[in-house]
Image (cartoon, helix red, strand yellow):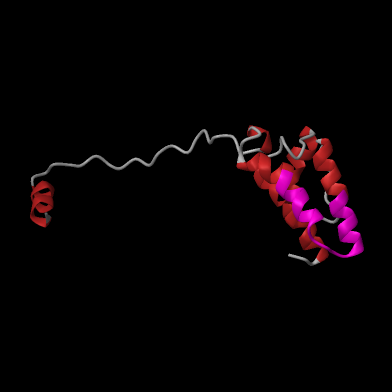
Amino acid sequence: MFSSALTLFTSGLVMPACKPPSLSPLPRPLAASDGVHTFTFDSVQRRLPLIIDKNEYGETLQADLRALAAEIAAGAPLKPLIAPSAEWESALAPHLEAGDTWFSAPWCRSGNRITAIFDREGHA
């Protein structure tokens, strides 16, 4: 095998350069609105409220989480986080401006939003 490669190299044959696949345009992000039979829908519709209902947290956090579960059930627009980090504020800004809901926002934002709430309360 090495001798074949050496022969190709020394014969002056130039192999075409490898061209990486284009990354543009990227597909749209996954969202809970992708359909009722998707992981993203199940995650937002069933799993997040279940996590909230089946665990006990401090009174303030529990109240925030129950309000969150009600927002999800109502299909309400996302609300700004209380005391977000700069990263979260920047990541959520376009979705808040667009009026995205838990279902229309990219799943990586809505699905991880609960993490930001836990972070704020020191439960990460």
Q: Nearer the viewer, residue 85 or 77?
A: 77
Location of the C terminus by quadrant is bottom right
Residue at 71% x, 35% y is 104
Give the x, y percent position of residue 31.
65, 38
For image coordinates 86% across by 43% down, the residue present is 70
Do we see residue 110 in this rendering? no
* Residue furthest to the bottom: 122
Q: Is residue 87 magenta?
A: no
Q: Quadrant of the N terminus?
A: bottom left
The magenta stretch is: 46-66
- Identify the image quadrant of residue 96: top right
Q: Quadrant of residue 41?
A: top right
Q: Residue 111, image x and y in percent? A: 69, 48
Residue 73: x and y in percent read 81, 39
Dominant secondary-structure state across the stretch colored magenta: helix
On whether residue 64 falls in the magenta region, the answer is: yes
Residue at the image point whose x is 91% and y is 60% from the top = 60
Task: Identify which residue, 11 or 19, lies in the foreground.
Answer: 19
At x 40% / y 39%, what residue is drawn?
21
